[in-house]
Amino acid sequence: MAIDTPFHCDHGKNIFIGSDVIINMNCTFVDNMPIKIGSRVLIASNVQIYTSSHPVLPQEIHAKSYAISRRMKLGRTTCNFPPLSV
């Protein structure tokens, strides 16, 4: 596993990363809920993964988990919102 800096996250304890993963520079993971990244995943620079969003009404606030399968590549400056599994 290799994570280039800068790397930003909310908690860090909700991020689970498989083997042979590369996360390029300037990525942001908002990990209010689990973010699961499988093995052999390449994440380009400036990728943003959010497990929560900012709804208009307070009763609509729901955090969702996020999963990335193995052997995937996310292109640079990708912004990903829940619920999503790739």
Image: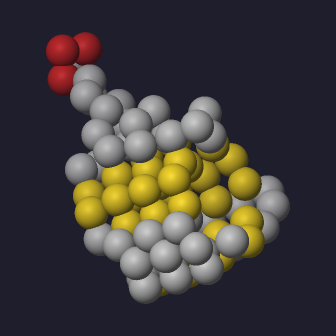
* In the image, farthest residue toward the front: 19
Residue at x 24% of width, y 50% of height: 83
Quarter where residue 71 is shown: bottom left
Look at the picture and state if 52 lies above or below 2: above
Rendering coords of residue 37 (x, y %): 46, 64
With respect to residue 41, does 6 lie above or below? above
Residue 52, image x, y percentages: 37, 37
Left-right relation of 50 to 82: right
Image location of residue 56, percent across then percent down: 25, 24
Identify the image quadrant of the C terminus.
bottom left
Residue 68 appears in the figure: yes
Q: Nearer the viewer, residue 46 or 22?
A: 22
Horizontal relation, residue 38 to residue 76: left or right: left
Can you say which quadrant of the picture contains the N terminus? bottom right
Question: Could you tell me residue 19's position as x and y percent?
Answer: 58, 74
Rendered residue at 61%/79% (across/down): 20
Question: Is residue 79 among what the camera can see?
Answer: no
Q: Residue at x 68, y 47 (%)?
A: 8
Query: In the displayed image of the protein, which residue is found farthest to the right?
Result: 5
Q: Nearer the viewer, residue 26 or 20?
A: 20
Identify the colour scheme used.
secondary structure
Q: Is residue 33 above or below residue 46?
A: above
Q: Residue at x 38, y 67 (%)?
A: 68
Please tell me how many numbered marks the rendered image carries: 0
Name which quarter of the figure residue 84 lies in.
bottom left
